[in-house]
Structures are given as structure tokens and as C-alpha cells.
Image (tube, rainbow, N blue to C red):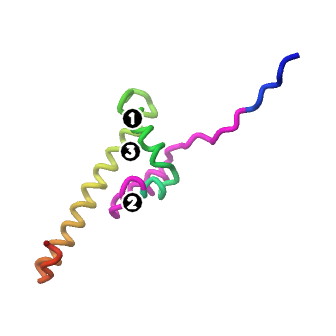
Amino acid sequence: MGVPKKKKRGRKPIELTEDRIDKFVQAIRLGCPIKDACGCAGFSERWFYLQKSKAEKAPQKPNSKKFIQFLQHIKEAEGLATQRWLAIIEKAAQGGQWQAAA
């Protein structure tokens, strides 16, 4: 008679759902840093960077393809956020608020 095996207690794997993607990308569009966008989407910054690393190392895997598309959405959102904030600063500077352009 052997020692009974203990059941592994672990967390349920995180799934990158469309809802999580939308929440993350929306946070980025608003100007949130990655760490805060991860919190908005319901996963850790550590998980995000781990998945990013895996996707970049093996882009041909199905999960990697989805994550790479997610990364492309992030890049687009970051670009839009930058444009939006620069437009706000430019408008304020043209309106006489020199501090906005400083």
C-alpha cells in the first residue's frame, strides 16, 4: 500500500477571452500603463509578459497566434492614445495655455 497522492491545487488557467481583450485594449486607449490594463482585464502583469514571451518564441502555435493578434491590437491602441493626448495638448497650447506645450 502506497502513500495516497495529493490532488494538485492550482489556479484555473486564464483564458484570453474577447471580453478580457476589449477591457485591456480600452484601458490602453485611455492611457493606462500595461500593469493597470492587466488589472482591468483580470489577469496579472506577470501572466501578460509570460504569455507575450511564449507567443514571440513560438508564433506558429494557435494560442500564440491569438496572443500576437492581441499584441497588435495593443500597439494600435497605444498609437491612438498617443495621438489623442498629443491633440489635447496641442489644442490647449493653441488656446493660450503655454504650460500644455511646455
Residue indicated by mark 2: 26
Locate residue 94 relative to residue 38 in the image: left or right. Answer: left
Does 26 sit above or below residue 43? below
Q: Residues within 10 Å of mark 1 (few under 14, many from 20)?
A: few
Upstream in sequence: badge 3 or badge 1: 1
- Picture mark count: 3
Q: Residues within 10 Å of mark 3 (few under 14, many from 20)?
A: some
Q: Amino acid under label 2?
A: Gln
Q: Tell me what residue is drawn at x 78 percent, y 26 percent.
A: 5
Q: Residue furthest front?
A: 3
Residue indicated by mark 3: 70
Specify the quadrant of the image occupied by residue 4.
top right
Locate residue 24 relative to residue 10 in the image: left or right. Answer: left
Q: Tell me what residue is drawn at x 48 percent, y 52 percent.
A: 20
User: What element does badge 3 sit on?
Assistant: helix
Does 3 sit above or below residue 55? above
How far apart are the two marked residues, 3 and 1, measured between alpha carbons?
A: 13 Å
Of marks 2 and 1, the one in the foreground: 1
Upstream in sequence: badge 2 or badge 1: 2
Residue indicated by mark 1: 53
The magenta-colored residue range is 8-35
How far apart are the two marked residues, 2 and 1, measured between alpha carbons?
A: 22 Å
Q: Residues within 10 Å of mark 2 (few under 14, many from 20)?
A: some
In the image, which disc is placed on residue 24? Answer: none
Of marks 3 and 1, the one in the foreground: 1
Q: Amino acid under label 1?
A: Ser
User: What element does badge 2 sit on?
Assistant: helix
Specify the quadrant of the image occupied by residue 10.
top right
Q: Tell me what residue is drawn at x 26 percent, y 59 percent.
A: 80
**Residue 81, image x, y percentages:** 27, 61
User: What element does badge 1 sit on?
Assistant: helix
